[in-house]
Image (cartoon, rainbow, N blue to C red):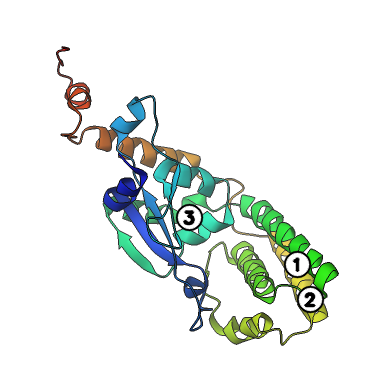
Amino acid sequence: MRPETLVRDHTVYACVMGSRAFGLATDTSDTDRRGVFLAPTPLFWRFEKPPAHVEGPGEEQFSWELERFCELALRGNPNILECLHSPLVEQVDDTGRELLSLRDAFLSRRAYDTFTRYALGQRRKLDADVRSTGAPRWKHAMHLLRLLMTARDLLRTGEMRIDVGDQREALLSVKRGEVPWTEVETRMTRLATETEQFLHRTPLPPEPDHARVADFLFRVRRDSALQPYPDDEVVQGVVRGGRVREG
């Protein structure tokens, strides 16, 4: 089964991400699509395993296999957690709806470390731009501010919201280069400090709910194994508990 076929025929959840999901889209914004596909269980019984992720088939499109997606979400990966909270859902089936119902199971205080680590990496790149060109890449500066706001509010409330709401114009002014870099730096420092302060009284649990997610994955894999796959006679025989003659 080719990677693009997995995305086409086995996607359980697909959404729009990037500026359009964050409420920061302009006339020139791309449409970034992200998705989750469920590779049929019998594909894992072969030497060549299905891919953990697939780029495409469309432009600006990227999808993860369900298990890989859950692994990253349990680690608090910012991009994955935000994907689960996109307000722009384009496709979802029963498995996808159950995945969305588990959003709170993935949230924990681990998010502080992962979001902070990602933010520090982006900040170093911005500082390097300032040293080499005298100015940061303003679009990246805007998105770093947005990420810091998301992390702060997540630690404060225990809930993730990715739409910037009434902060849209303030953030877009940064993207347009209308805010001095020193002021942007001050905002970043303040947001990082506030996030650390909320860590000490956050309603988030210390760890994600591994058991709920593991139970979900087990049931999904089991149900997939019981589905008929007419293109593979051997797999059909194993799934049904029957005997397949050789030769």
Q: Position of residue 140 (x, y in %)?
A: 66, 70
Dot 1 alpha-carbon crowd within 10 angstroms: few under 14, some 14 to 19, many 20 or more? some
Instruction: Find numbered disc 2 in the image and state the secondary structure of the residue it sits on.
Output: loop
- Say which residue appears at 45% left-offset and 46% top-offset: 53
Q: Position of residue 245 (x, y in %)?
A: 14, 13
Q: Earlier in the sequence, mark 3 or mark 2?
A: 3
Per the model, the C-alpha gap separating discs 3 and 2 is: 39 Å
Horizontal side of 95 relative to 128 (left or right) equals left
Q: Earlier in the sequence, mark 1 or mark 3?
A: 3
Instruction: Find numbered disc 1 in the image and state the secondary structure of the residue it sits on.
Output: helix
Of tags 3 and 2, which is closer to the observer? 2
Dot 2 alpha-carbon crowd within 10 angstroms: few under 14, some 14 to 19, many 20 or more? some
Quarter holding the C terminus is top left
Residue beneath disc 2 = 135
In the rendered view, would you say 210 is above or below 9?
above
Residue beneath disc 1 = 126
Residue type, mark 3 in image: Asp
Q: Position of residue 156 (x, y in %)?
A: 63, 66
Residue beneath disc 3 = 104
Per the model, the C-alpha gap separating discs 1 and 3 is: 32 Å
Horizontal side of 136 relative to 151 (left or right) equals right
Q: Position of residue 66 (x, y in %)?
A: 40, 45
Indicate which disc residue 29 carries: none
Dot 3 alpha-carbon crowd within 10 angstroms: few under 14, some 14 to 19, many 20 or more? some
